[in-house]
Image: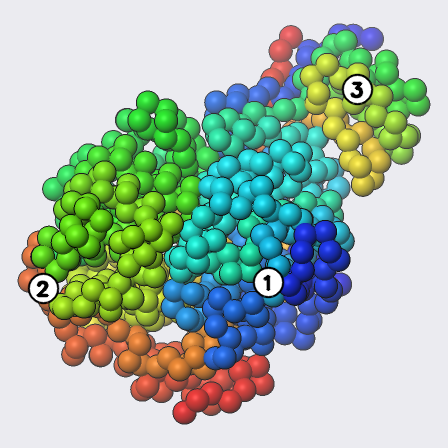
Amino acid sequence: MKKNPRRYIKSIPDNCSGCRLCELVCSDEHNPNFTNPKRSRIRIKIEHRENKNTPRVCLQCEEHPCVDACPAKAIRIHSDLGIPIVSMEECTGCQDCVLACPDGVMYFDSQKNVALKCDLCGGDPECVKNCPMGAIVFEKSA
Amino acid sequence: MVLKGYAGRILFINLDNKKAGEALQYKTEPLDEKILRKLIGGRGYGAYLLYNLSGPTTKPLDPQNPFILSTGPLTGTPLAGSKFAVITKSPLTGLFLDSYSGGELAGEIKYAGYDHIVIQGRCAQPSYLFIEDEKVELRDASHIWGKTTFDAEEILIKEHGGEAKILVTGPAGEKLVPFACVCTDYYHQSGRGGAGAVMGSKNLKAIAVKGSKDVTVSDSEGLKKFRQYLQEKFKKSQFGDLRVKYGTPYTTTTASAIGVLPTRNFQQGSFEGIEKINCFTIKEKIWISDHGCLGCQAPCMNFVKAKKGKIKLVGPEYETIALLGSNVGVDDIERIAEFNELCDAYGVDTISCGGVIAFAMECYEKGIIDQKMTDGLDLRFGNADAVVEMIIKIAKRDGFGNVLADGVKKAAERIGKESPHFAIHVKGMELPGYEPRGAFAMGLAYATATRGGCHRRAKPVEIPQDRFKYDNFGFEGNAQMVKKLQDFREPVHCGILCDALLRFCFELEMKDIAEMYRLVVGWEDISAPELTQLAERIYTLTRCYNVREGMDRKDDTLPPRILHDPLPDGPGQGKIIGDETFNKMLDEYYFLRGWDSNGIPTPETLDRLGLTDIVGALPK
């Protein structure tokens, strides 16, 4: 397999206002017409008293421990994007991937019992398009 | 429920003298689909609930006064900045109150599966409500009772693992100060009208909400395109960039120049110290970062640090700078930030608090009161240390603070002599940061706002003449303009989205609001004319609430100073609003609204707006 350039969503916390519009559009994008930020694959860590807001989303790391951790083999590398994608149908909700993720950016939807991982919206991330502050950018490094 | 956007349910809770841990009486009811399109949600539907659940015999601090948290179908959707409203009978005015707040709570109420939460009754002891989807529990609040809003919220957030969103009242609410606010996400307040005292009267320190349900929309592809449209509107808007860069304090740059900046208890309309408290000084001296409400494309709030980091908050907003800055004669932005933080911590509205302290300062400088009465405080204008003392005294109802703690109207009754002449309020609510003598239409806006002296229903200040033809120092065109500005806010406040965001950053029109409802709710044929009629309906419904309380034309007035005295400075120098001009504006306004010459909605108007059955008989 040819090596893809690493593509991921980079966060710039200093720019983030904590509005969570990214969470709202992410949740809607992956389940059209339904919104709850608790189903988003990007989350803003908000430290209110200091107004410190940190967008936290999968860095699409090359080691992908989530793939290795999944006992159901439900996380597989996408041939075009070159990033791990969770198959919603095959995910059993065991959360081994959540524990395995070193950055704590594999989220979990306890209502639907599935792991939530950034899939870059197939290559055109909705959160990046909607961020009013430039606090998340789509990085395409070689 | 077929309609999208709505959660579809109202949660009714009766605290019924219960103790923490005891089972609560609560029930859910579906929204009444017959009236949904007539009143939509938020302020409209909330007003309907309040109209039915309270009346002239309900006292604001009675257990039965409903404390209603209202959202609307647009709240929590991926559209724009969301807000919620507290709707209740105001302890400050005894009239209809709707008080809005941003932050994150608005969405969470919807995610928990409710459009409105109605709370009546009183807890047997200090408690807080925990609502998680279907779970509704009364929990002990003895560990947070007496605590500041910041401390109480921090404790609850720790207890609930961060995902619950909290509404909390401060020590002033516990002491039933009728301009006590409620706070959420530390820095967001439903400031005006005393919602905090209503919570206090219920022995309810806080409400924690957590929700796992989805908010639905009708057309998420359409919303995507609409968000792009909003981005384009933002780029083209006159004030969008400035709003994000400076926030509401940008108003300071013009307010003083055009002579509408309340200064020393509305004795002047411009302030010699404006350069030290304007938005540029904020940016240079205390600004740290921007802060936004849930889903907002134009985060307009400033997180600041002052006094070497000891003071930190989101603010001060323009109104705070005006009322706790120029209006008390203080020209130090760090001290204003300090006042702001104190007000938020103790849970009092910065506008009313600034108004009542400025009033006391004028009484003091005029020799109507002296240091014996002020507990030894030298209450001269500009004495920032005295302002700090007074905020705490008011919130705790301590000594002279207790004389002021019931608002400026009552304070003037207590202090007497010529002080009622300069007690600056409408219907008991202290005026915010726009001096009407520099923009006469603002006087009409204050006189006709449902909740009293309020700038958030219409702000006819600095409106370009190409948008409206009006006489800034006369009456012509003013009634028409005020009505139109009020009407625009109504469907937004039903949404509930941020009115300032839609109006100033996107410069949206009624047709855009209709499009939002079409995309979210799925009302395919909703139109701007329908929303204009909806606005008239809701304005008249809230009017009827107040009329039923005994209010009429005599209450739609301005403080004697504002109405009869000339302004000594600024472009409005020497201009007097006067009875004649004011009455002409009011007559025309009533006519446009379809109310009679006494300000009572006519039976024909009620019929035209489809309100006859909802409103019932009004006093003659």
Q: Are marks 3 and 1 in contact (CB under 8 Å)?
A: no
Quarter of the figure with the N terminus of chain B: bottom right
Residue B32 shows in this picture? yes
Q: Are marks 1 and 2 in contact (CB under 8 Å)?
A: no
Judged left or right of residue B225, residue B503 is left
Place of residue B177 in the rendered image (x, y in percent of width and height, measured from the top left):
40, 57
* Residues flagged by tags 2 and 3 on a common chain: no
Find disc 2 in the rendering and name its residue: B566
Q: Pointer 1 indicates a residue of which chain? A: B
Compared to A98, does B469 lie above or below? below
Q: Between tags 1 and 2, which lies in front?
A: 1
Which residue is outermost to the front? B372
Disc 1 marks a residue whose amino acid type is Arg
Compared to B85, does A20 lie above or below? above
Judged left or right of residue B334, residue B90 is right
Q: Pointer 2 indicates a residue of which chain? A: B
Disc 3 marks a residue whose amino acid type is Leu
Compared to B47, does A9 lie above or below? above
Label disc, if present, on residue B122 of the rendered structure: 1
Q: Residue at x 27, y 77 (%)?
A: B586
Q: Are marks 2 and 3 in contact (CB under 8 Å)?
A: no
Q: Residue at x 37, y 40 (%)?
A: B342
Quadrant in which residue B573 is drawn: bottom left
Q: Foreground residue, B481 or B145?
A: B145
Real-space CA distance between mark 2 and mark 3, rounded to the nearest whole angstrom: 71 Å
Q: Earlier in the sequence, mark 1 or mark 2?
A: 1
Q: Foreground residue, B155 or B430?
A: B155
